[in-house]
Image (spheres, helix red, strand yellow):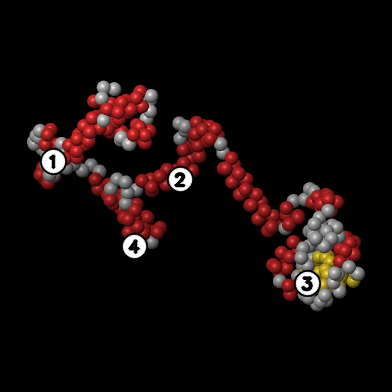
Amino acid sequence: MGKEFNYVYLTINLLNGKQYVGSHSTNNIDDGYLGTGRYFFRAVKKEGKENFKKEILQMCENIIEARKLEESYIIKYNTLSPNGYNLSPTGGCERGFSGALSEEHKRKISVWQKGKTYVELYGPEKAAQMKEKQNIKKLGSTIKKASQERKDKISAWQKGKTYVELYGPEKATQMKEKQKQRKLGTTSKRKGKKYIEGFINKYGEKEGLKKYEEFIKKQREAHIGKIQTKETIEKRKQSMRDPWNKGKKYHMKNWVPKIKILKITKLEKLLNNETLVKEIINLRKKNMSYRKIFIKTGVSKYYSKKILLYGAY
C-alpha cells in the first residue's frame, strides 16, 4: 500500500552550498527527513542536521514516479559529486522499492566512475581510509601466502650477509643497539633489568638511562690496567671452599643407590620371561623404535636395551 506523500526534494548544506537530490515517501510531511545518500549522510553526521535545509521540488503520485524525476533534477541543480552529494547520475530511479540496482544502472555508475580517483569519488578523508584498508589487506595476504619454498629462498639469500648488507648502516646500528639492550643482565647483576629500573625510578626514563650508562662506563674504566696483588690472590684462594670429594676415593659398590638394585631385580624378572624377551628381540630385528616397543609390550627403552644386551640380540 502506497504512502500519502511522495515527492522529490533538494537538501542544501548552509555552510558550503552543496546540494543533494533525492525522493521520499511518507505519511508525515514534517518527519524531519533530510536524505540517506552515503556521501550525503556522512556530511550530515560531520556538519550537523541544523546546518542543512530541505526543499520539496515536486509532489508525485507514487515513489516510483518520484525516483524517475531524480535524474533530471540532479542535472538541473548539478548535484553530482564533487559539486554535490549525489554519487549516481540517475539517483534512485531504477531501484524500485527493493533498493536493488539493475544491470543498466550498474553500467551507468561504472561509466560515471571510470577514470576518477578515490578523492574525487569519496573525498580526501574517506579516500585515505580506503587506501589504508587496502594496504592492510594486501600486506596480510602476502604474509599468509608466503610458502615454505619462498621462506627457504629468503633464508638462503640472507645467509652469510651482515646487517649492513641486508638493512643498511642506519637500520643495522639500531638493531645492534637493541640486541645489546636485550643482552644486559646476562653477564652480571649490575647489568640486570632490575638495576636499570632502579635508575629509571630514581631519575626518570631519559635521565635514568643516561646515569646508568655513565655508571657502567665508570665501572669499566676503574678496572682497566689494574693487576691483583699476590696478597689478594692468596686471600681469594683461602676463601674458596675445597670440593667435598677432594682426595677421597670410594669403591664403586658404595655409589650404587638403592634404586639401581631395584632395577636389577626387575631386569632379572623380565629376563626370566622368555616369551617377552623373544618378542622384544624380534621387534628390534624389524627395526621397530623403542617407543613403539614400549607401546606394544610396556617395557621401557632402558629395559629393552638391557634385554637386548643380555638376551643375545
Circles 4 and 1: CB atoms closer than 8 Å: no
Q: Of callouts 4 and 3, which one flags the residue occurring earlier in the amino acid sequence?
A: 3
Residue under numbered circle 2: 174
Residue type at numbered disc 1: Pro
Q: Quadrant of the N terminus?
A: bottom right
For marks 3 and 2, give the CA distance: 58 Å
Residue 243 numbered mark, or none: 1
For marks 4 and 1, give the CA distance: 43 Å
Residue under numbered circle 3: 33
Give the label, 4 or 3, closer to the camera.
3
Residue 262's place in the image compared with 217, above or below, is: above
Q: Of callouts 1 and 2, which one flags the residue occurring earlier in the amino acid sequence?
A: 2
Q: Of callouts 4 and 1, which one flags the residue occurring earlier in the amino acid sequence?
A: 4
Residue type at numbered disc 2: Gln
Give the label, 1 or 2, closer to the camera.
1
Q: Of callouts 3 and 1, which one flags the residue occurring earlier in the amino acid sequence?
A: 3
Residue 35's place in the image compared with 139, above or below, is: below
Q: Quadrant of the C terminus?
A: top left
Answer few, some or many: residues within 10 Å of disc 4's Cα (few below 14, many 20 plus, some between 14 and 19).
few
Res 226 quadrant in image: top left
The structure residue drawn at horizontal position 88% and vertical position 64%, both measured from the top left corner, is 64
Q: Position of residue 5 (x, y in %)?
A: 86, 73
Residue type at numbered disc 3: Tyr
